[in-house]
Amino acid sequence: GTCFNPAATRGSQAAQKSPASHVPIVVFMSDGGTNDSAQASQTLSQLNSIVLQRYNRDLELHVIAFGGGADTRQLSDISRASKIGRLHASADSTALTQVFESIAGGDDVTALME
């Protein structure tokens, strides 16, 4: 399976380098299933504490379960690393596009990128 904590650690490091004028958002995506989800959750929980202290708000954390057979149990645990963490499910690329559009505030992301 995929190891979650290295990605959570790198994402946390990148988020902590955000300029003070920018509030970081973390998007974590997997098909689920690993042996280190508890560590990844801990890493993102620590990042949430840093964001809360720095910006006086919880980390906007989006966890995406990708694929029809995605294991959402561990990903759901990771989404709870922030009080406002959210688990999204996307069975295919069309659903994944809709998830990203939702995260972006409803804008048509593909039109913005063209």
Image (spheres, grey):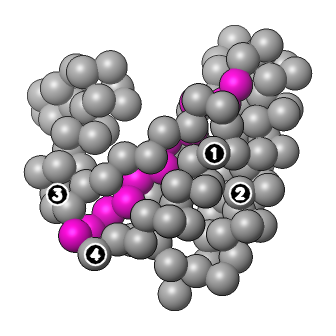
Percent from the top left, x then y, of residue 43?
Answer: 78, 55
Q: Residue furthest bottom?
A: 1
Which mark, by number, is residue 41? 2
Mark 2 and mark 1 lie on one chain; the one further toward the N terminus is: 2
- Check disc 1 and give the amino acid type: Arg
Residue 9 placement, left or right of 91: right
* Label 1, residues with CA under 10 Å away: few <14, some 14-19, many ≥20: some
Identify the secondary structure beneath mark 2.
helix
Residue 50 placement, left or right of 27: right
Mark 1 and mark 3 lie on one chain; the one further toward the N terminus is: 1
Question: Which tag is nearer the camera, tag 2 or tag 1?
Answer: 1
* Label 2, residues with CA under 10 Å away: few <14, some 14-19, many ≥20: many
Q: Residue at x 79, y 56 (%)?
A: 42
Marks 3/4: CA–CA distance: 14 Å
Percent from the top left, x then y, of residue 26?
Answer: 57, 41
Mark 4 and mark 2 lie on one chain; the one further toward the N terminus is: 2
Residue tagged 1:
80
- Check disc 3 and give the amino acid type: Ser
Marks 1/3: CA–CA distance: 25 Å
Residue tagged 3:
93
* Label 4, residues with CA under 10 Å away: few <14, some 14-19, many ≥20: few
Q: Quadrant of residue 70?
A: bottom left
- Check disc 2 and give the amino acid type: Ser
Q: Residue at x 70, y 25 (%)?
A: 58
Percent from the top left, x then y, of residue 59?
Answer: 66, 30
Region rendered in magenta: 58-68
Which mark, by number, is residue 69? 4
Marks 4/1: CA–CA distance: 21 Å
Mark 3 and mark 4 lie on one chain; the one further toward the N terminus is: 4
Residue 16 in view of the camera = no
- 112 vs 56, nearest the viewer: 56
